[in-house]
Amino acid sequence: MKTLKVLKITSVLQIIFCLFCVASTVCFAISNYAMTHNSDWRTPFGVANILIYGWVANPVTPISFIICVIFFLIERKQPENKQLIGKKWIWIFIWPVIATFFYFAALMLTVAFTGGV
């Protein structure tokens, strides 16, 4: 049952991707708040710049989507595998939507907190 195994791996990778988006955005927000209140606290900005590499150029979403679809299309032809997969196959299509939302939200908030492109 490779589809379920690949789907679990995809879920873990997508959660890590979303956590990178949230963590870098939170660090940028803390840094922005500290700068507007005349504080010289630059550590969150440096951490956010490091965390941004976890989501800016991360191709995990399209690669995992393609791999999951390939395994799903191969294994869905067998009735016992189709029954084992059940409704879990919908996550193959939900994870890219969630990851895209987190990506664009982190992108827009990064631009907002850092003062533009």
Image (tube, rainbow, N blue to C red):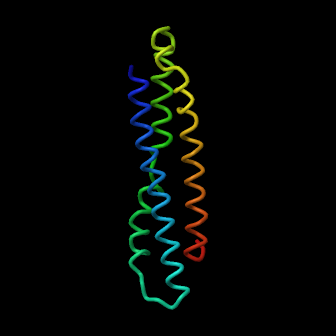
Q: Quadrant of residue 87?
A: top right
The C terminus lies in quadrant = bottom right
Residue at figure coordinates x 54%, y 33% from the top left: 91
Residue at figure coordinates x 58%, y 48% from the top left: 100
**Vertical placement of residue 78 versus 62, above or below:** above
Residue at figure coordinates x 47%, y 89% from the top left: 39
Depth check: give the residue in front, 70 or 3. Answer: 3
Say how many tags the image has: 0
Residue 9 appears at what percent x and percent y?
A: 39, 36
Residue 3 appears at what percent x and percent y?
A: 43, 24
**Vertical placement of residue 110 versus 86, above or below:** below
Judge from the rendering whether residue 44 lies leftward or rightward of residue 114; answer left or right: left
Outermost residue toward the bottom in this view: 38
The N terminus lies in quadrant = top left
Outermost residue toward the top in this view: 79
Residue 86 appears at what percent x and percent y?
A: 52, 20
Residue 71 appears at what percent x and percent y?
A: 45, 23
Residue at figure coordinates x 41%, y 42% from the top left: 12
**Vertical placement of residue 5 versus 75, above or below:** below
Depth check: give the residue in front, 8 or 63. Answer: 8
**Vertical placement of residue 2 versus 49, above or below:** above
